[in-house]
Image: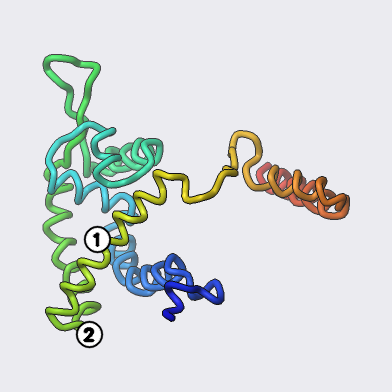
């Protein structure tokens, strides 16, 4: 049986294999975006979405880019400061503003996208047309399945609440349940070290 369908170690997991591909295949794109054009991968994603989709509300942009709304707000602030995105006020309702790419943002898109497409073609040249079509179909099916699994909670009941300490709190509770005071002391020490570093 395929190790993707029946993983035997963590490197067999689909998410790890996709992450490896993203890291190796995306590295040239990141160097291009950051080194030559001064934008992060997240900033580029929003510039591309706005250039291709036109002006839209920040919430619509978050949905299109599949980003958390808070991350979109932070990234948009950076793009406005860099001059690639501007806010567009709704004439009928001034409280409802949209965002759009500026002339500089559109110019960046026309310069950067062809270079990213070239990187993509270099990666895909190991597959023939039929294989590429199969991969495209499989990725679409896996993405849709991932959405279904995500919507159903992924079979995971416990969720880390970052406002209450996130994974550190869960680990601390687990240590207490196992009567492991040493582990609790390590957690307290780590938190103390992190607090000192932040000052």
Residue 78 disc label:
none
Side (left or right) of 67 relative to 1: left
Q: Nearer the viewer, mark 1 or mark 2?
A: 1
Contact check, label 1 and label 2, Cβ < 8 Å: no
Q: Secondary structure at mark 2?
A: loop
Residue 181 image offset from top left, x and y in percent: 88, 50
* Residue situated in front as seen by the camera: 133 or 148: 148
Side (left or right) of 190 relative to 59: right
Quadrant for the N terminus in the image: bottom left
Above or below residue 33? Residue 119 is below
Residue found 28% across the figure and 33% down from its top: 59
Q: What residue does disc 1 label?
A: 140
Neighbourhood count class around disc 1 (C-alpha, 10 Å): few under 14, some 14–19, many 20 upward: few
Residue found 19% across the figure and 79% down from its top: 131
Where, by quadrant of the figure, is residue 133 drawn?
A: bottom left
Residue 160 image offset from top left, x and y in percent: 59, 43
Where, by quadrant of the figure, is residue 79 drawn?
A: top left
Colouring rule applied to residues: rainbow
Q: What residue does disc 2 label?
A: 126
């Amino acid at each position: 049986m395929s190790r993707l369908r029946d993983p035997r170690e963590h490197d067999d997991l689909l998410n790890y294999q996709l992450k490896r591909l993203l890291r190796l295949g995306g590295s040239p794109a990141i160097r291009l975006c950051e080194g030559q054009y001064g934008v992060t991968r997240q900033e580029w994603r929003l510039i591309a979405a706005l250039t291709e989709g036109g002006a839209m509300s920040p919430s619509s942009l978050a949905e299109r880019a599949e980003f958390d709304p808070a991350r979109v707000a932070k990234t948009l602030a950076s793009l406005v400061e860099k001059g690639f995105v501007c806010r567009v006020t709704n004439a009928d309702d001034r409280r409802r503003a949209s965002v759009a790419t500026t002339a500089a943002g559109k110019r960046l898109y026309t310069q950067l996208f062809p270079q990213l497409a070239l990187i993509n073609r270099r990666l895909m040249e190991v597959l023939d047309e039929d294989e590429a079509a199969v991969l495209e179909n499989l990725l679409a099916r896996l993405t849709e399945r991932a959405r279904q699994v995500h919507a159903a909670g992924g079979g995971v009941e416990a969720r880390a609440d970052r406002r209450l300490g996130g994974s550190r709190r869960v680990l601390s509770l687990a240590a207490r349940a196992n009567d492991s005071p040493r582990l609790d002391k390590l957690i307290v020490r780590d938190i103390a070290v992190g607090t000192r570093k932040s000052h």
